[in-house]
Amino acid sequence: MPRLALRFAALSLTFAAAYAEAPAQANGRFPRAQQLVISRTDPSRMFLRATFGVIASTDGGQRWRWLCEQAMGFSGSWDPPIAIAPHQELVVGLTEGLATTADGCTMHTTLAGELVSDLSVTTTGDLMLALSTPGKPATVRVRNAAGQLSPAGAGLPGVYIDTLDAAPSRPSRVYATGIRVGASPEPHLFVSNDRGATLRELHPKLEAQGRLFLSAIDPRDPDHIFIRALGESGSDLIVSRDGGASFRLALHLDGAMQGFAMSPDGQRVWVGSTDPKQGIYRSRDGGETFTQGARLVVYCLAYAANTLYACSEAFRPDGFAVGVSHDDGTTVAPLARFSDVEGPVRCDAGAGARCDGEPWAQMHATLAAVSAPAPELDAPPSQPDAARSPSPPADARAPAPGRACACSVPTSAAPPPTSLGAFFALALAGLGRRSRSARVDRS
């Protein structure tokens, strides 16, 4: 057996005891960091979405607490969009509504029956929601600081919205990307000038014919937009300066373009790849040119308080869940590992209390196994799983090109593997998952 194969077998055995004793609570998926959102007004407050729920920190990442999926109102392999509302509340998009919590213990759910496919917080403090409920036209609605929800517009029949965002300098300008349900996952880009009440499709000429994911809008120019395009030949960062009428290629990566971050003035841009040979690319001229920085696996990027944050591969011998860079991405130092999670959010009662006891005991065993150092093992190859395509639920998916099923756009409700071998097959093969790590969150 080749040396690498032997080491993968050893890696499987390393975790076998932990999973035999305490079944994984990450829905059969390998624990992985996916999206980091940081409060705009209080950078010490941050939430990390992972494949096993959300972990929260109120001290800049020094200490972390776990909020399990059951407490937030979802299960399966749905990876929800998250955001931080102006009152420092965590907002979670569900397949059956919108969950909001200020303390991780008491959950408030609204929009029952609606699938919330993306979230964005505007510079004016409004929460924008993309609703892509199966059987209904996709709509964009706005919730103001008082909790009032804008009426639904005509919407987009047969569309699943992947990402949306409002222009910081003109909040009435909204861009959205998505797919047409039941069709090939071709690029679709929409724009609105009335806060999403009406949306019209743009038809720019694009080289890649995969899916589009909105990454950022220039803080000063509502016509200057950054989009991640996924195609068969890799990932492209494409940029428009005319409101989406045309695009130029800013950066091509052979691997999955999984992370994106932008400084508040729009001058510095970072892009991350799941290929450790590519790692972080940075621009100091607003995305015109890029140079390579640190080489590591990147699953998400975020920028706050003059600090660049990166989600990375936690189960490498020297890996971590979240790292920090103070030199524009030249180097990244570990900030938190999954083994640093101290326990569930402390709750005497309420939804958060559902994470205590046996759920935490099982999760703690899983995270300790994943974070255990194993210097004698080579790290497995990086897989472009989470960047391949944030996927709608099974009944909202579009079939993959040239196939009768949506095999390359995996379901968001995949059943957990039934054996340890199946678990590692999923972990290493990397089934596509929902991910908004490659967009700037206005939280």
Image (tube, helix red, strand yellow):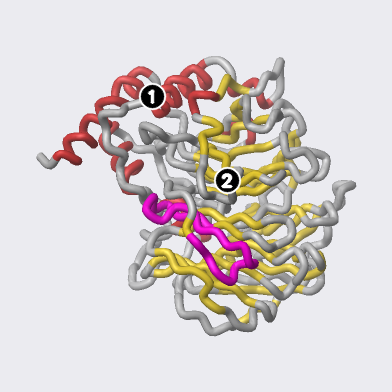
170 or 172, nearer to the observer: 170
Q: Which residue is mark 2?
A: 35
- Tell me the quadrant of the picture where the N terminus can be found: top left
Residue pictured at 60% horizontal, 38% vertical: 48
Highlighted range, magenta: 271-291
Where residue 237 appears, x then y in whole percent?
Answer: 52, 68
Residue count near mark 1 (Cα–Cα under 10 Å), binned few <14, some 14–19, many ≥20: some
Where residue 133 appears, x then y in whole percent?
Answer: 62, 58
Per the model, the C-alpha gap separating discs 1 and 2 is: 23 Å
Residue pictured at 57% horizontal, 43% vertical: 325
Residue at the far left: name it. Answer: 1
Q: Amino acid at mark 1?
A: Ala
Local SS, label 1: loop
350 or 89, nearer to the observer: 89
Residue count near mark 2 (Cα–Cα under 10 Å), binned few <14, some 14–19, many ≥20: many
Q: Amino acid at mark 2?
A: Gln
Precedes in sequence: disc 1 or disc 2: 2
Magenta highlight on residue 27: no
Vertical comparison of 100 with 23: above or below: below
Residue 186 shows in the view: yes
Q: Which residue is mark 1?
A: 372
Left or right: 64 in relation to 330: right
Vertical comparison of 32 with 375: above or below: below
Residue at the far right: name it. Answer: 146
Residue pictured at 54% horizontal, 37% vertical: 322
